[in-house]
Amino acid sequence: MTAGRAERLTSRIGAVSLLLGAIVLVISTQLHPAHENPMDNPAVFREYAQSGLWIAVHLGQFLGFLLMIAGLVAVYYSLATRRDAAAAVARFGLATAVTTGASFTILQAVDGIALKRAVDAWVSAPADQQVASFAAAEAIRWIEIGVASLSFVLVGLTLLLFGIALALSSVYPRWVGVIGAAAGVA
């Protein structure tokens, strides 16, 4: 396989990954139970405990996000072969994309698995263990909120860096980079 052909294949795989990842992420997020006030932990925990799709939703979000990271890795490779500012910025974008993927993996483990197990334990706990079970679920919830906060800061930084790299490159239309950078700032 020639270098040009391999680069085109990587770009196509990346484009499909980005699009498929966005679709999977949107669909799985739409299925996520979120009808209760997010700061009303007893109501939220009951809603989560009643969800039969909880783990599937979070695995879907995880898969969608990893597909999007794969797409960004392909974008990096399309920019990295050049010797310009876009390639330099894309290197930092790659580092943040990998870090974001790791952070999102941790988020899904905490939110998608640990929190679900904790709220299920609280709902089914005997009366004398309800307070302790609730406190354990609430502690996991605060960890989830903390990890989510940092994860989404990393998402923004990743989009900002890739947006700048795309805007500086001659490979993609400048407007694609401007939209990416604006999404990262937002």
Image (spheres, grey):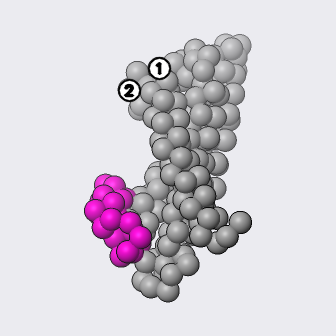
Q: How many marks?
A: 2
Q: Residues within 10 Å of mark 1 (few under 14, many from 20)?
A: some
Mark 2 lies on a secondary structure that is loop
Q: Nearer the viewer, residue 163 or 3?
A: 3
Location of the N terminus (image quadrant):
bottom right
Does residue 148 belong to the magenta stretch? no
Q: Residues within 10 Å of mark 2 (few under 14, many from 20)?
A: few
Residue 124 falls left or right of residue 186: right
Q: Amino acid at mark 2?
A: Asn
Q: Nearer the viewer, residue 125 or 65?
A: 65
Does residue 166 belong to the magenta stretch? yes
Kindly indicate the quadrant of the structure image that contains residue 127. top right
Picture residue at 49% right of the left edge, 78% below the top: 87
Magenta-highlighted stretch: main secondary structure? helix
Q: Earlier in the sequence, mark 2 or mark 1?
A: 2
Q: Which residues are magenta?
A: 165-186
Q: CA distance from mark 2 to mark 1?
A: 8 Å
Q: Residue 50 appears at what percent x and percent y?
A: 58, 14
State whether residue 9 is above or below residue 146.
below
Pointers 2 and 1 in contact (C-beta within 8 Å): yes
Task: Give the residue at mark 1.
Answer: 43
Q: Nearer the viewer, residue 61 or 163?
A: 163
